[in-house]
Amino acid sequence: MKKQFPALIPFLLLLLMTWVLTAVPARAESTRYKRTVEKYKLPDVVLINQNGKKVSLASMLNTDQPVVVDFIYGTCTTICPVLSAGYTNLQNRLAASGQMPRLISITIDPENDSPNVMKEYLKRYRAKPGWDFYTGRRADIDAVMKGFNAYIPDKMSHYPLNLIRSPKDGSWVRLFGIMSSSELMKEYLQVSGK
């Protein structure tokens, strides 16, 4: 049992985060995050996903469905698990209605987040197809963060941020702060028009 317990820690953390994110009273929802609508000029860079495949940022983002983006890293124990639990819940809830959201996590620690590390991270959160984790050259990652007005010079000072791209006009809903699963779902559905 002692040898199996460390393997259960990510699962228990996910369960705890799911409970925290869904147990928040509805009246507190509107004060916990800031919502703005933005237009971004993003760099034309190539990033590498958890399978080692090179993909251009433009091809990831220019789709006919909403795209949700966050910035995380594989060894984070603070904000990243909360954001990732939100992605897991969004995938599970939308899958129940036959939808497969396009979720993109971009590392802020490309020196350490290899495709293997990212693949293991996604496995811990039981990611379904449609959620990809990207790394790349430091200069490219920095350019992407700056393009989203989300530059984080030190991974230890990162913050909770979700961005949802509207397929209608290419605008981005910027969601700054900790959100419940219900809030993220509401924002996603609003952007998707469903």
Image (cartoon, rainbow, N blue to C red):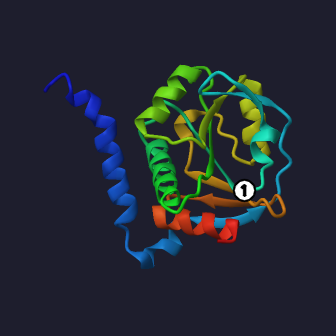
Under mark 1, the amino acid is Gln
Q: In the rendered view, does 114 fall on the left or right side of 26?
A: right
The quadrant of the picture occupied by the C terminus is bottom right
Kindly indicate the quadrant of the structure image that contains residue 64: bottom right
Q: In the rendered view, does 32 fall on the left or right side of 148?
A: left
On screen, 94 above or below 60?
below
On screen, 185 above or below 25?
above
The quadrant of the picture occupied by the N terminus is top left
Q: Residue at x 57, y 34 (%)?
A: 155
Q: Position of residue 133 (x, y in %)?
A: 60, 35
Q: Work out whether residue 12 can be spotted.
A: yes
Q: In the rendered view, does 120 fall on the left or right side of 159?
A: left
Q: Secondary structure at mark 1?
A: loop
Q: Position of residue 2 (x, y in %)?
A: 15, 25
Kindly indicate the quadrant of the structure image that contains residue 113: top right
Q: Position of residue 96 (x, y in %)?
A: 48, 60
Q: Work out whether residue 75 can be spotted.
A: no
Q: Position of residue 162 (x, y in %)?
A: 61, 53
- Label 1 belongs to which residue? 65
On screen, 112 above or below 124?
above
Outermost residue toward the front in this view: 98
- The residue closer to the viewer here, 28 or 154, is 28
Q: Residue at x 34, y 37 (%)?
A: 10
